[in-house]
Every structure is written in C-alpha cells, then in structure tokens.
Image (spheres, rainbow, N blue to C red):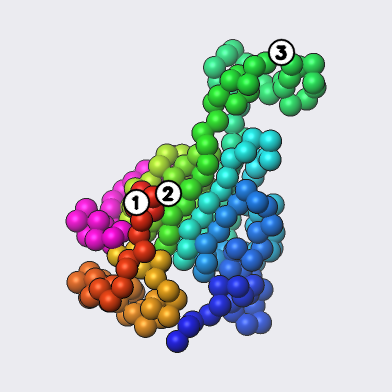
C-alpha cells in the first residue's frame, strides 16, 4: 500500500488543472515537499512564474513549502523583491534603474529592510486567492482563508482570515497541537501514512498517537518550529 507517487505530475488522470507542485518547480530558490498540490484552471504548470512574484535571484530569499499542503487557485506568494525601503523620505527604488544611482547607496539601504525567507510548514490549506507577504512563516496545520492576506507569522493549527490576515481561532487546544507536532505524521513513510489514513483524517488524538507508536515520529528540533 503505497498510495500515489509524489513524482506524478498530474495526480488525477485525464485532468491537467492539478499538479503535485514539486514536479513543476525549476528554480533552485523554491523548495516544495512531496504531495503538496496546486489547482488552477488556467495554468497550474506555470506556478513559479505566475504565483511567486518579485522573486529575484540577486536578493537571495527562498520560498520553502512543506509536504501535504493544498493550494487553491490564485494562491500567491509575494517575495522580498516587492518591498521598498521606508527608512527615508522616498520609497522609490532608484538603485534598480541605473548603475550610477546604485553606487550612491550602501547595501544596508538597499537590502536592510528585507524580511528573509518565506516558509510554509506541512499540511497547510490555502484558500482561493490567498496571498502571503514576504518573510512570513506559516506553521504546520494552519488554514489560510480565501482572499486572506498573510503579513505576519501564523502559529501551528491556526485559522487565518481577512486583510490584513488575523488569527480567528486555533483548530485545537494547545496541548493537542503539541501532540500533533510530536506525531508529525507527514514525516512518516508513505506506506505508514496509507495504512493509517483513518487516524490521520479522524479527530481522535489517542488513536493517532497509537498509530505513531510503532516507529519514530520523524520530528527533529528544527522541524518543531514549523
């Protein structure tokens, strides 16, 4: 029992509107985990050009999306190239148009306002036309509502709606969230995921912990934050 291959381009046979996203990414500064998908009636294949915006190599920021995420049509990531410095009187990006203009600015003026990488954990659901602003971390299990604009970090298993995006509730109490992050089912071998789909899709945390008990959860210290 292996389930579908994460290396499949179109997981639904005869339908090209949905892609397992990692298989259409070519840029080295974008990373996407297994089974994360994107759905778009117009052109799902061109996600990295149409939906990841202002992502310039010279800036160096990265977009990292974990496993088992669901991205609805119009999910957009605005990267640091869209940001203009607000430390002085003008926000105009003089330095990008002429070398002699660039030479008058030090690197701190040009890059000091940038917010770093954009990071999405695992099992995150993005609603239609949701937007993620530069340098945001969205932790595992979160839900981003349709048309939400996420400009600040999102905790695990939070529900975010609106513009600006705000956390309206946590999906589970803090103790249950901690247990879910310890279980980290998205790091199980796919055979184990397939065997325990009823527990993963269910709402009995004890049953899910029992399913996890026969092996390592796969959660290390660096992954716990997401």
**Residue farthest along the bottom direction in this orientation:** 1
* Side (left or right) of 129 relative to 104: left
Which mark is in front, 1 or 3? Answer: 1
Distance between mark 3 and mark 2 Cα atoms: 37 Å
Q: Does the residue at mark 1 contact the one at mark 2 (Cβ under 8 Å)?
A: no
Residue carrying label 3: 104
Q: Which SS class for mark 1?
A: helix
Residue carrying label 1: 221
How far across and down, in percent of the image, does residue 78 sit? Answer: 58, 43
How far across and down, in percent of the image, does residue 223 sit? Answer: 39, 53
In reply to whether residue 170 is colored magenta, the answer given is: yes
Residue closest to the eye, 159 or 207: 207
Q: Residues within 10 Å of mark 2 (few under 14, many from 20)?
A: many
Report the span colored magenta. 162-182
Q: Residues within 10 Å of mark 1 (few under 14, many from 20)?
A: few
Residue that appears at 35% across and 59% down: 219
Residue that appears at 59% across and 36% down: 80
């Amino acid at each position: 029992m292996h389930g579908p291959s994460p290396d499949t381009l179109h997981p639904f046979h005869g339908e090209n509107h949905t892609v397992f996203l990692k298989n259409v990414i070519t840029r080295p500064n974008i990373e996407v985990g297994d089974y994360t998908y994107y759905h778009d009636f117009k052109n799902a294949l061109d996600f990295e050009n149409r939906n990841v915006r202002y992502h310039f190599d010279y800036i160096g920021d990265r977009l990292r999306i974990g496993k088992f995420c669901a991205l609805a049509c119009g999910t957009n990531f605005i990267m640091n190239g869209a940001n203009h410095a607000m430390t002085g009187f003008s926000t105009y990006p003089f330095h990008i148009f002429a070398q002699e203009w660039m030479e008058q600015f030090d690197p701190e003026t040009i890059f000091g306002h940038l917010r770093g990488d954009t990071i999405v954990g695992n099992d995150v659901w993005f609603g239609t036309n949701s937007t993620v602003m530069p340098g945001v971390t969205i932790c595992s299990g979160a839900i981003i509502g349709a048309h939400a604009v996420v400009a600040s970090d999102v905790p695990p298993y939070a529900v975010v709606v609106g513009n600006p995006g705000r956390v309206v509730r946590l999906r589970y109490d803090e103790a249950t969230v901690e247990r879910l992050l310890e279980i980290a089912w998205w790091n199980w071998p796919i055979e184990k995921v397939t065997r325990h789909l009823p527990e993963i899709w269910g709402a009995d945390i004890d049953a899910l912990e029992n399913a996890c008990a026969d092996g390592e959860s796969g959660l290390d210290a660096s992954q716990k934050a997401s």
